Image: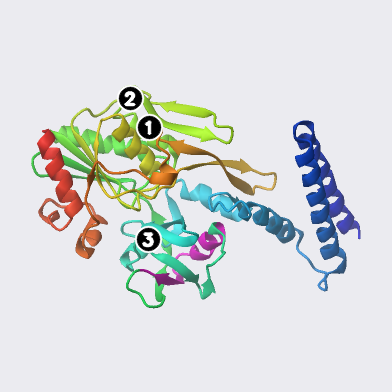
Amino acid sequence: MKKIRHLVVGAVIIAMIYTAGFSIGKGRAAEDLDTKLETFLDVLGLIKTKYVEKDIDNSKLVYGAIKGALESLDDPYSRFLEPKAYSEMRVRLKGTYSGIGIYIGMKDKMLTVISPIPGTPADKEGLKAKDKIVEIEGKNTKDMALEEAVSMIRGKAGTKVKLGIMRPGFKEPKIFNVSREKIEIKSTSFKMLEENIAYIKLNTFEKQSAPAEFKNALNAAKKKKARGLIIDLRGNGGGLLDNAIQIGSMFIKSGIIVMTVDREGSKEIKYSSGDVQWTSPTVVLVDESSASASEILAGALQDNKTATIVGTKSFGKASVQSVRVLSDDSAVLLTIAKYQTPNGTDISKKGIQPDVFVAEPTEEAIALKSEPVKPEKTEGDTQLTKAIEVLKAKL
């Protein structure tokens, strides 16, 4: 009974503090919250004193309640990370982790592949952007939290995970057995194309070294006497906001990179640092799997008229998550604002609309774009071919 008292009393203290904070300014809303918290405590007490199994894990009980609260927001990007999951996230931001190599998110309330990371098991097994993951190890993903899905897909290198995939043309889910391995993310790859055109494939904004890698690629382009640049953001599921701002600042001398709008409608404006590294003509390639930080960079270059956007409409993921680390090293990722482009476009509603629309490439070209482009193998990629054409007109 002592353990029960500690758990319930602790929850009561939290409830009192929480409602006291709201009562100062919210009045009736605080009273309603107080009633709901009492209901929660009633249920908690019933579980601890009456549930048939006495051996109840308090962490699972509390973590489950937290996850349920966040899931009720109907926002797949607001989520709770248990200590192990938060530790894994921190490792991933360094560019190395164990998994299959995909970015996933929620699209139309379905678990969706944003993009496979080039050269990873997911890419090699044929997973594609916009694939719907309907099963993980035989478990239906309907109503599954994003973090649960991520946790199930990741695992020890050398093991496999079974994914049920739906895509146009599939009459029923197709099972993909995908190997897990150590994933080392290379942020950029660089190649020279015809007519002194440089090509930089920016794979991710997640890795903290992404701006430095991108700057190195720009320096390589300048050494090769490139007169024009193509930045390929197709398949780039995003990453760190600061990385997008730093890379955007390499093209924009002064002006806005991105704006964030919070729940009160207040705007925070992120300006270019002025660290310009490239001033020659530029074209940016985007597709429906270009998301988050990719959309911030593309939108900034488009609105500041420093690049022409070619491809299809982008993914439309434009929410800002704040990470609050808790006392037990778990963490809450909470959406606190939304992104807007410098001209005020709400990315979450529209995505980035290209200046020059070009439909998705053929299957052969999709396979090609997962690798650094070779000059002799650009003809199958209709979007890249158009980007070269647009860029040549500017030279």
Mark 2 nearby-residue class (10 Å; few <14, some 14–19, many ≥20): some
Q: Secondary structure at mark 2?
A: loop
- The structure residue drawn at horizontal position 62% and vertical position 47%, both measured from the top left corner, is 331
Report how far apart the C-alphas of labels 1 and 2 lie in the structure. 8 Å
Find residue 300 and report its image quarter: top left
Q: Earlier in the sequence, mark 1 or mark 3?
A: 3
- Which numbered disc, 1 or 3, marks the residue closer to the eye? 3
On screen, residue 214 versus residue 320, left or right, reads left
Query: What residue occupies the far left of the structure in this picture?
Result: 195
On screen, residue 88 versus residue 174, left or right, reads right
* Up/down of 261 relative to 1, above or below: above
Report how far apart the C-alphas of labels 2 and 3 lie in the structure. 35 Å
Q: Are the two marked residues, 1 and 3, in contact with CB atoms closer than 8 angstroms?
A: no
**Rendered location of residue 65, percent (x, y):** 71, 56
Report the residue marked by disc 2.
275
Q: Is residue 231 visible?
A: yes
Q: Secondary structure at mark 1?
A: helix
